[in-house]
Image (cartoon, rainbow, N blue to C red):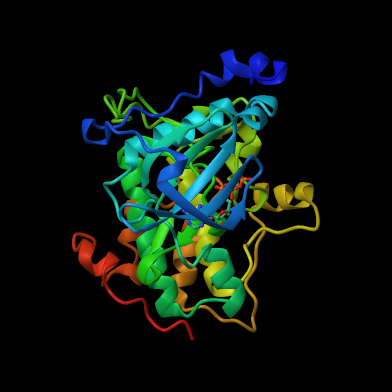
Amino acid sequence: EVSSGSQQMTPRAAQIGPAKMSSSASKRKTVADYQFGTIIGEGSYSTVYSAIDRQQGKTYAVKVLSKRHIVKENKIKYVNIEKLTLHRLGQQHPGIVQLYCTFQDESNLFFVLDFAEYGELLSIIRKFGSLSEQVSKFYICQIIDAVSFIHSKGVIHRDLKPENILVGNNFNLKITDFGAAKLLGKSDENGESVDPGSPTPERLGSFVGTAEYVSPELLKHNICGFESDAWAIGCILYQFFIGVPPFKGKTEYLTFEQIINVEYSYDPQKPLPSDVKLLIDSILIANPDERFTLPDMMASSWLADVNWKDKACIWQRRVPKFE
Ligand code: ATP
């Protein structure tokens, strides 16, 4: 029986169709294929469960999105962007949460994702207060490598922050939450980039992202390019060492003011190695043209000993001790 409410939403909900999967996935999964466990987390329009694939016995994170809620809150665009981006990027990089399949029932959409068993990077920073130089280096290398890959596919994440970086298998990082992403160029039906598009900054209609990690150019000129992701990486690196992001006012307005004026300082009680400070200061530059790019970060003195071509070294090494 279909209520009049769901009948009303059907035409728009139909725009959030399931992703086209490869031919090997011709037998589409359904809810019955998974044994749902506990709730791992909740977003503004989604609930994430741990769920075991009954056939494989493997645990996944299944993101359940209520169609009614998505339509009511006008989030169709964001859900589609998330799905399209994960398809464009998925299965190609260890530092990005993989989308294995999508399916739907009458009321919900289901995204079957990699299960990041240790949750958000933010919880680890909070648990330890800050991260050691070794762990910070290990993790910033994973972030730079993953974001470089994302950029190479013509995608700007636009909401990088420790809540959107998950900690999975062997404590390796996985970037998630592409709902605010900007896809440059066209995508074919499998989400592959056909044309990487122009890397010039995009003008935006409205603010996306999170107050503390948002770039000055977005606040001042409403533009957001690859440089804005670089800015967020600078904020995250600062947070690894200090425990809190560099720009954090009592209100969002005060935070924005600090960002526009690039007003941040170091705690004399927590001295940073000079080459780390140099790297942070070279990223947190108001003018995006003068800011360190990701290749600049890779070539910085602090990261000079990293062999960026050796992916195994970045992704398969054991994470250094947290304390
Ligand atoms: P919002 O939509 O409000 O920005 P969100 O993006 O965090 O919130 P979800 O993507 O639904 O919303 O995630 C909700 C929570 O579930 C997250 O905070 C995260 O802790 C957890 N979570 C999401 N995806 C995974 C995953 N693949 N593995 C483990 N935990 C996850």
Q: Considering the image in quadrants, where does the N terminus appear?
A: top right
Q: Residue furthest left?
A: 310
Is 188 on the left-hand or right-hand side of 217?
left
Q: Position of residue 73 (x, y in %)?
A: 69, 29
Compared to 314, does 164 lie above or below?
above
Q: Residue at x 65, y 39 (%)?
A: 219
Name the residue rendered at 41%, 67% in the picture.
139
Q: Position of residue 122 (x, y in %)?
A: 57, 65
Q: Say which of 25 and 218 sits in front.
A: 25
Q: Quadrant of residue 72?
A: top right
**Foreground residue, 109 or 323?**
109
Is residue 238 or residue 260 the one in the foreground?
A: 238
Image height check: is 243 above or below 103?
below
On screen, residue 234 versus residue 92, left or right, reads: right
Asked whether the viewer can see residue 21, the reply is yes
Residue at horizontal 65 percent and vertical 62 percent from the top: 264
| Image point (31%, 23%), residue name | 189
Question: Where does the image place residue 13, in percent across and percent down from the top left?
Answer: 57, 21
Residue furthest to the front in view is 1
Please state if 8 lies on the left or on the right of 49 as rendered. Answer: right
The single residue placed furthest to the right in the displayed view is 250
